[in-house]
Amino acid sequence: MSDLVWALIPLAPFMLGGLVIWTRHQSKMAEKYGHLPGAADPDAERMREEMKYLKDRVAVLEQITTDGHSSKQLKNEIEQLRDR
């Protein structure tokens, strides 16, 4: 067993060099194909903006429904909007 360890010690720098080369290659491929978590994605940014817009609209609708109108008055307003 100890003879095997002594035989592997001279190979350690080559294995370490191979690991470094392989790691760099994986990193470059991840950057190239956009698999990094911090990679800039134009679709993701567009979706964030759209999500913010929709959340703002939902907030406005919630405010409209909860601003103290009676249900009959709210029903009349909805009917008026449908008639447009």
Image (spheres, helix red, strand yellow):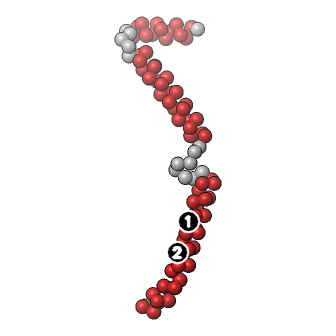
Q: Point out residue 78 in the picture as x, y percentages from the top left corner.
A: 49, 11
**Image: 69 above or below 42:** above
Q: Label 2 crowding class (10 Å Cα cut-off): few <14, some 14-19, many 20+?
A: few
Numbered disc 1: secondary structure: helix
Locate the N terminus by quadrant.
bottom left
Locate the C terminus by quadrant.
top right
Q: Residue furthest bottom?
A: 3
**Residue shown at 57%/8% (left/top)?**
83
Q: Point out residue 45 in the picture as x, y percentages from the top left corner.
A: 56, 38
**Which quadrant of the figure has residue 75?**
top left
**Which quadrant of the figure has residue 40?**
top right
Q: Is residue 29 left or right of residue 73?
A: right
Alpha carbon distance from label 2 to label 1: 10 Å
- Residue 81: assigned label: none
Q: Amino acid at mark 1?
A: Thr
**Image: 44 above or below 54:** below
Q: Point out residue 14 in the picture as x, y percentages from the top left corner.
A: 56, 79
Q: Which residue is mark 1?
A: 23
Q: Amino acid at mark 2?
A: Leu
**Residue shown at 41%/18% (left/top)?**
63
**Residue shown at 63%/53% (left/top)?**
33
Q: Which residue is mark 2?
A: 16
Q: Disc 2 or 1, which lies upstream in sequence?
A: 2
Q: Point out residue 39 in the picture as x, y percentages from the top left corner.
A: 56, 48
Question: Considering depth in this image, is 48 or 6 the residue closer to the camera?
Answer: 6
Question: Considering depth in this image, is 76 or 33 the residue closer to the camera?
Answer: 33
**Image: 36 above or below 71:** below
**Image: 56 above or below 4:** above
Contact? badges 2 and 1 (CB < 8 Å): no
- Count of numbered labels shown in the rendering: 2
Q: Label 1 crowding class (10 Å Cα cut-off): few <14, some 14-19, many 20+?
A: few
Numbered disc 2: secondary structure: helix
